[in-house]
Image (cartoon, helix red, strand yellow):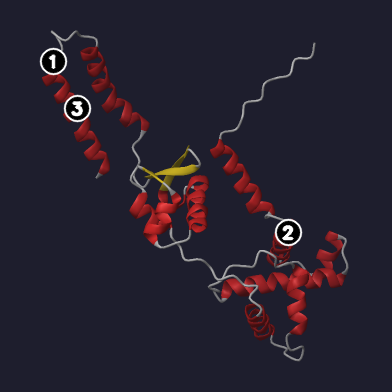
Amino acid sequence: MTIVPIRPQMTEVEYDRQRAKLRETYGDNSIEAAAKRDQAIAILFYRSGWTQERLAKKERKSDSWVLSHVRFGRFLNFLTDVRSSESLPKNLTESRFRSYWLRADPKETNERIRFQAVLMLMRSQSIWAARRPSIGEPIKEGFADGKWHRPSVIAEKIGADEAHVLDTIKGMSNNGTYGCKVERKRVGQQIEFRIFKTDKTVSLDELIEKLAPIIKELKAEGKKNMATMSPATVSHLAGKLSNLLDEWAR
């Protein structure tokens, strides 16, 4: 008889985290995957500082192939230099960039000016998506209160679309961005999130040192019967807990 080991199922949060990593690495389709690959290779070529001949030999590619990718790398670096207010199109492969490069004025010998012409061509054809405004801080300030919130409610309150809210909260969950920790649960057909600020942390040693005696005393009171239990003692212990929470919140 063959024994098949039982594989524990991923939680929905774990699945979403792994799926987000795949999407970030490979995109949502083959074109996006090709674009991410081309961009990564071009940036590597640019940062390597190697000659085209050395790169061609290392990669076992033609000089023209290497030249095109090195130029693409310089264009990506140009975008960083000019601090473009837009994010890269998800389908910007090297070949697509090259099509715009060839359409720009070939008589222009200043590469940066020609890069600017390429950028203008891309904008004119609406392949360039405007960078969405950052909404992490508004979400943090308005909803990092430890209570459960639906993304639709968050979106309505801060004036953003729900997809943008979900993307931002996923970033918080996966990467701890904006100093937040995120929990998630499903309520019927709806998803709700609970967000906590992690700007302030308390060491485990301090928690144990200060909370353990209070917990011990509470347990002792809980074992007493109604006749011997002291409400005053419970109230005193609750006050000590409240004072600690206030201290850690400051």
Callout 1 amino acid = Ser
Q: Residue furthest front?
A: 188
> Dot 1 corresponds to which residue?
230
Q: Where in the figure is residue 18, as x and y percent of width and height? A: 61, 42
Tags 1 and 2 touching, CB below 8 Å: no
- Tell me what residue is drawn at x 50 percent, y 58 percent: 164
Instruction: Give SS at disc 3.
Output: helix
Callout 3 amino acid = Ala
Left or right of residue 180, residue 3 in this image: right
Callout 2 amino acid = Arg
Reading the chain from its start, which is encountered first: label 3 or label 1? 1
> Dot 2 corresponds to which residue?
37
Q: Where in the figure is residue 84, as x and y percent of width and height? A: 55, 74
> Dot 3 corresponds to which residue?
238
- What crowding class fits label 2: few (fewer than 14 Cα within 10 Å), some (14-19), or many (20 or more)? some
Q: Residue furthest left?
A: 232
